[in-house]
Image (tube, rainbow, N blue to C red):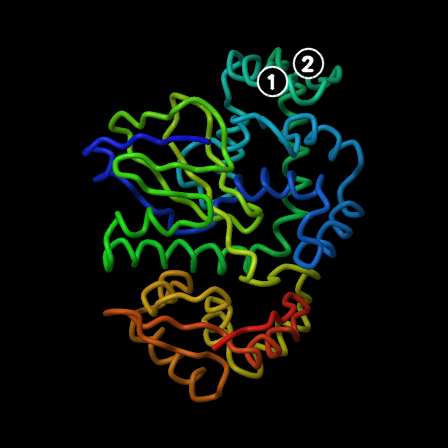
Amino acid sequence: MLRIHFSFSDLTKVTVARHASAVWEVLLSLHMLQQSDGRAIFGDWRRRTQVAVRPEVLDRLRRLAPPRGYSADFLTPSGEDEDFNTGLERILSTPKRQFDAQLAMVAKYRAPNAWATALGSGHPRVVEELGEALREYHAAAITPHWQAINARVAGGNGRVGDEIGRIGLDQVLSTLGPGIRWKSPVLEIDSMIGPDLHLQGRGLRLQYSAFCWRAPTKLLEPDATPILVLPFPAHAGPFIGQAATRSGQDRVSALIGGTRSAVLEATINACTTTAVARVCAVSLGTASYQLSILREGGLVRSHRRGPSVEHRITPLGLRILSATGEYTAPTLTA
C-alpha cells in the first residue's frame, strides 16, 4: 500500500489537469502495448501499433518502460504539457545524471542493452535517437486517436474539478476509485507500493489517462511536482479503435456540423456544460446551445447533479460517431 500524506498547505494546492498529457499517454500506452489486458478496448489499437512502429523503435522504448515495476521518470517530465513537442523538448533536455540514475533503476526490472547503456551516459547521438523513437511512436500510436483521447480525459478531469467545487475535496478524495481511501490527512492506495509519500507543501496534481488501466500510477522523481494519474472505471467502455478516416470525419461534420460534432465527442465521458466548453474551446453559451440541439435529437442525455448539469452521449450518438471508424459503442445505462 502507498500512503500519501497531506499537510493543510497541500490540501489547498490540489489541482486537476485540464487536458490529456501527451507524454503520459505515450508512457502508459507503452505499458498497455506490452500487456494483454483490456482486449475489448485496446486489442485493435495494439495490432495496428505493432505493425505501424518499427521493431527497433519499440525495442528501444520498451527498454525504458517495462510494463511492471519502474519506468524512467524522464519520459514524463512534470508540468502540464498539453503539446507533445513541448514535452519532448523537456525529455531530451534531461541532465545526464538523471538519465544514469533512472536507467539504473529501470535495470532492476529489465536488463539494459547497449543502446540503453549509452543513453544512460547521455551520449548526444543516442539522446537524438530517443527523440526520433518517441516521435515515430507518438505519430503512430497516439496522434490518430488524440481527439478521442483528449475528449475523454478532459471530460474526466473536468468532472473532478467541478466536483471539488461542488462537494468538496474531502469527498472527491474519498471517491477516486476502488482501493483508494481518504483517511484525512492520508490518501491510501492499495494497488501501489513504496515508502510513504509526504507532499511537504508541494500539493498534488490529479490527472486522468486514457491508457491508465485499472490502477493509478504516480511520478516517482522526488524533486518533481507530485502527480497522481488515475484510470477510468472499466464500465466506461471502449473509446479507441481504428484510426478515424478523413472521409468518415467529413460525413459526420456534414451531417451535424463541425462544432456540434466536437461537442458530441466531448460527451463520450460524462461532463458538465463548462467542461464541454473548455474541451471544445467555445463559449459557455455556444456549448449550451449545441448540447440542447444534440439532446433534442436524442444524441445526448443530460441530468442534473447538484448545481451542475452533466451530459453523456447516447448509443445513437455513438453510432453517429462510428461513421469515423473511431468508436465502438459500449452498452450505456440510463
The answer to whether 68 is drawn above or below residue 166 in the figure is above
Residue depicted at x 51% and y 49%: 231
The answer to whether 98 is drawn above or below residue 53 in the figure is above
According to the picture, the residue beneath numbered tag 1 turns out to be: 103
Comparing 29 with 332, the one in front is 332
Q: Please tell me whether mark 2 sits on a helix, a strand or a loop.
A: helix
The disc, 1 or 2, on the residue closer to the chain's N-terminal end is: 1
Task: Give yes or no for contact between labels 1 and 2 (Cβ–Cβ under 8 Å).
Answer: yes
Residue depicted at x 36% and y 76%: 303
Residue depicted at x 44% and y 41%: 81
- Residue 125 in the figure: left or right of residue 253: right
Picture coordinates of residue 186, whole percent (x, y)? 31, 34
Comparing 152 with 123, the one in front is 152
The answer to whether 260 is drawn above or below residue 179 in the figure is below
Name the amino acid type tagged 1: Leu
Comparing 85 with 6, the one in front is 6
- Residue 237 in the figure: left or right of residue 219: right
- Specify the label residue 117 is tagged with: 2
The answer to whether 108 is drawn above or below residue 197 in the figure is above
Q: Quadrant of residue 204?
A: top left
Picture coordinates of residue 224, whole percent (x, y)? 39, 26
Single out the residue that lies furthest toward the left.
8
- Residue 209 in the figure: left or right of residue 158: right
Picture coordinates of residue 168, whole percent (x, y)? 23, 53
Single out the residue that lies furthest toward the bottom.
296
Residue depicted at x 56% and y 57%: 234
Name the amino acid type tagged 2: Thr
- Residue 23 in the figure: left or right of residue 126: left
